[in-house]
């Protein structure tokens, strides 16, 4: 796409409410806050941010969002019955998806965001490998396809907390049916899957329905690499280039900030015991992650935040990131 055309491509800047998860507000208060920052999309990534799925509540939230000129997206957690993250107390995976699909139709969300699990599902001695979890998730999605598509909705499966690498999520989407399943593309989570986020974007761009965007720091440590999630602009993974590439490859899709600032997490890839869960990772893909780490410098953990100040710190992190992202988009 030519630079002049790229400059005219509309970008819907969104906010994922997980960014300000400690605020404990009502959905109306969340919407009013996001409106102050000119968010065009608000992503209720978990039911708790909505309060409940009662029809009256959903219609009230929808009406307020329409008054503010804000588009809504809603989401749920694990839809993989074999994942350690799956909550069977809420019903079968199929039942949970259909319940959320009904809520999405009521509230006016075009998608239901969901995920498989976390890096704990990548397998190990005696554990189900990630390929098995993908197969189980595909079965669930195929079982609900007619009901979901009948509602005019799509399921946006996130690359979540290091559960799947890009080629694995691509396989899940294609096997489940790319006509109704796509990606909620997260730019931070690839770092927890020893993957360059630019590779993740390049692989999944044709399938992107929505996004979570945040910056990361990565650097070498004696056992492998360390990763920190940081405010937009504070990382070393070329988040500016990522935003430009997202704008070009995923035109019209929401660029939604999910800002999470963390302490360093080490990935001990120099230890052979690390590799059972990543045995199918191509060397050429892993080398891109290592190249990022080689360019990084050690960064200390952020000072701990007392619980009573967590909500304020989350808002500060988000607001700084909104300002930086608006500068990038401008």
Image (tube, rainbow, N blue to C red):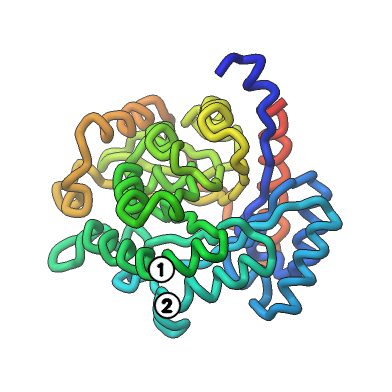
Could you say where residue 34 lies in the image, as x and y percent from the top left? 76, 53
Could you say where residue 328 lies in the image, as x and y percent from the top left? 66, 27
Front-lying residue, 194 or 168: 168
Front-lying residue, 142 or 77: 142
Q: Earlier in the sequence, mark 1 or mark 2?
A: 1
**Marking on residue 79:** 1
Calculate the distance from the C-alpha at mark 1 to the C-alpha at mark 2: 9 Å
Could you say where residue 312 lies in the image, as x and y percent from the top left? 72, 57
Q: Secondary structure at mark 1?
A: loop
Could you classify mark 2 by the number of other residues whose Cα lies within 10 Å: few (under 14), some (14-19), or many (20 or more)? Answer: some
Residue drawn at the location 35% of the way across and 43% of the way down = 166
Q: Which residue is mark 2?
A: 87
**In which quadrant of the rendered image does the C terminus lie?**
top right
Query: Is 227 rendered above or below residue 67?
Result: above
Residue drawn at the location 76% of the way across and 64% of the way down = 62
Residue drawn at the location 49% of the way across and 39% of the way down = 216
């Amino acid at each position: 796409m030519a630079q002049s055309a790229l400059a005219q491509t509309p970008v819907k800047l969104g906010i994922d409410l997980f960014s300000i998860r400690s605020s404990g507000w009502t959905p109306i208060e969340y919407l009013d806050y996001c409106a102050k920052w000119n968010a065009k999309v608000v992503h209720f990534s978990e039911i708790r941010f909505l309060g409940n799925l009662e029809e009256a509540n959903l219609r009230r939230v929808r009406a307020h969002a329409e008054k503010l000129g804000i588009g809504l997206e809603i989401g749920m957690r694990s839809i993989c019955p074999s994942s350690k993250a799956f909550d069977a107390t809420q019903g079968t995976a199929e039942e949970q998806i259909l319940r959320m699909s009904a809520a999405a139709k009521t509230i006016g969300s075009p998608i239901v965001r969901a995920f498989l699990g976390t890096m704990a599902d990548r397998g190990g001695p005696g554990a189900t490998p990630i390929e098995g979890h993908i197969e189980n998730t595909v079965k669930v999605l195929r079982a609900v396809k007619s009901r979901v598509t009948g509602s005019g909705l799509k399921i946006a499966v996130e690359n979540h907390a290091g559960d799947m690498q890009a080629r694995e999520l691509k396989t899940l989407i294609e096997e489940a049916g790319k006509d109704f399943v796509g990606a909620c593309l997260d730019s931070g989570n690839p770092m927890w899957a020893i993957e360059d986020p630019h590779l993740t974007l390049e692989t999944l761009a044709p399938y992107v329905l929505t996004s979570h965007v945040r910056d990361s720091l990565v650097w070498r440590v004696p056992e492998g690499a360390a990763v920190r999630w940081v405010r937009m602009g504070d990382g070393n993974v070329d988040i500016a280039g990522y935003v430009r590439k997202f704008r070009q490859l995923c035109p019209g899709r929401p660029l939604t900030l999910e800002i999470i600032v963390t302490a360093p997490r080490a990935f001990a890839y120099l230890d052979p015991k690390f590799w059972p869960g990543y045995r199918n990772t191509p060397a050429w893909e892993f080398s891109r992650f290592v190249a990022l780490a080689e360019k990084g410098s050690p960064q200390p953990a952020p000072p701990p935040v007392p619980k009573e100040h967590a909500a304020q710190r989350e808002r500060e992190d988000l607001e700084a990131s909104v300002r930086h992202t608006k500068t990038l988009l401008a």
